[in-house]
Amino acid sequence: MEPTTATRSEDLYARAKEILPGGVSRNTVLRHPHPIYVDHAEGCRVVDIEGVERIDFANNMASLIHGHAYPPVVEAVSAQMRRGSAFSLGTEVEIRFAEHMLSRCDVFEKIRFVNSGTEAVMGALKAARAFTGRPKVAKVEGAYHGLYDYAEVSQTASPDRWGPAERPNAVPVAYGTPERALADVVVLPFNDIDGSLAILEEQADELACVLLDVMPHRVGLNPAEPAYVEALRAFTAERRILLVLDEVITFRGQVGGAQKWYHIEPDLTALGKMIGGGFPVGAIAGRAEVMEVMNPLNSPLLFPHSGTFSANPVTMTAGLTAMSHFDEAAVAHVNDLTLRAKDGIEAAIAASGARACVTGGGSMLRVHIKEHPPRNYREAYLDAEERKLIRVLLAHLFDAGIIAINTCTMCMSTVMGVEEVDTLIAMLGEGLDHVAQLQR
Ligand code: PMP
């Protein structure tokens, strides 16, 4: 018999492909030539089933603020599991977690929990429609907001379809998206005040809300220019259009979210990822008057809203524990580590001579194979050459024991220290030397 050289991950993937489309349930797990399967993880280190250990700067797509198997969460969740995991009755921990979340941000007057960021954005858009009685939503070109038809429009627009820069086309993501759904999505050019306001002015009478992520990952992970955010807030307030912030990722930026970087008050905020303490979660938080559309004690009830696993006590316990430990000091720790990483990476870019740059804010950063930080989706868009070089860089990092998000984005967790950050800088430096050679 031929000796087999297949790794265990390779074998598992062969089985997975037989039963899951593409062998995965989420596309981000795919790697070339096959996904790597995890054995266990602790703190910021993940060990795969081959026994290889890596430092995790992906943190499950920026959803783990305290890394893996965080002892306070493990303990609290284990205790809750022994008491049951889901009921069609209420639990006190939902109320305690809601009180905690409201204490983090003044504009959170009421909150409702769901099970994912997709669901949170969907709920916020439906609440905005119910509140205003208007059908359309506006969003920024290229911004990722999950899978809801209306939220995903133009997330992956390509140059052959995206249309004029100051007036982007509404480009579907999924084949079969109804034209009628596309017609109800208004796509805005990020950071372009005049362009965006001109479009909004035309659509104002039909708009329920503007949906905005102030540091959209796919648009370059560059914080929105303050004047842009302020202009959108002023316009929406004047025209009684709601401003919905998507803080599914960015809430890690401050105790009260990245909205605290700007002098604005959104009407609604969609939350998710980190606030679940490692468990599936989403939440819609905002002005009491708007949240009232979900109040089932009202008649008529404007927006009936439910979910079998919404506010289950396991997620509520994990979330409350994780968020209680993500206080001012913890925020400062991860944000300081990120500043150190950004400085180090900038120096490494300069030393390597690579045409590259780094963007980010709070506890996240992204390396671009571009000379200048992108201001919008079109500037962040990767051509074939840049795509290839990003893959080279990511492969180098992975082989050097570092897990990053597949756009070459990294995020910190509270269990990291200077040592991990300096390792990241050193390994990125090596990878950038390689990139610089290929660029010559
Ligand atoms: N909004 C943003 C900004 C996100 O980054 C994501 C997930 N990457 C979502 C919404 C959707 O969240 P989920 O994957 O939990 O549905």
Image: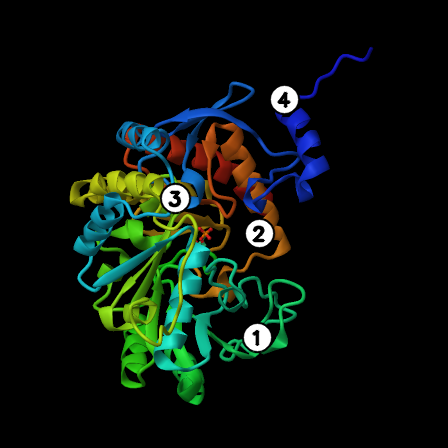
Q: Residue at x 17, y 54 (%)?
A: 103
Q: Are marks 2 and 3 in contact (CB under 8 Å)?
A: no
Q: Is residue 423 above or below residue 374?
A: above
Q: CA distance from mark 1 to mark 2?
A: 30 Å
Image coordinates for residue 94, horizontal then vertical, percent: 27, 48
Q: N-terminal of the two: label 3 or label 4?
A: 4
Q: Residue at x 66, y 34 (%)?
A: 16
Please name the residue that numbered disc 4 is placed on. 8
Give the left or right position of residue 386, taking residue 266 as reference.
right
Amino acid type, residue under disc 3 in the picture: Ser
Q: Quadrant of residue 117?
A: bottom left
Mark 3, ligand 1, within 8 Å: the answer is yes
Q: Secondary structure under badge 2?
A: helix
Q: Secondary structure under badge 1?
A: helix
Please name the residue that numbered disc 1 is placed on. 182
Q: N-terminal of the two: label 4 or label 1?
A: 4
Image coordinates for residue 217, horizontal then vertical, percent: 43, 55
Please name the residue that numbered disc 2 is placed on. 386
In the image shown, does 205 or 51 lie closer to the viewer? Answer: 205
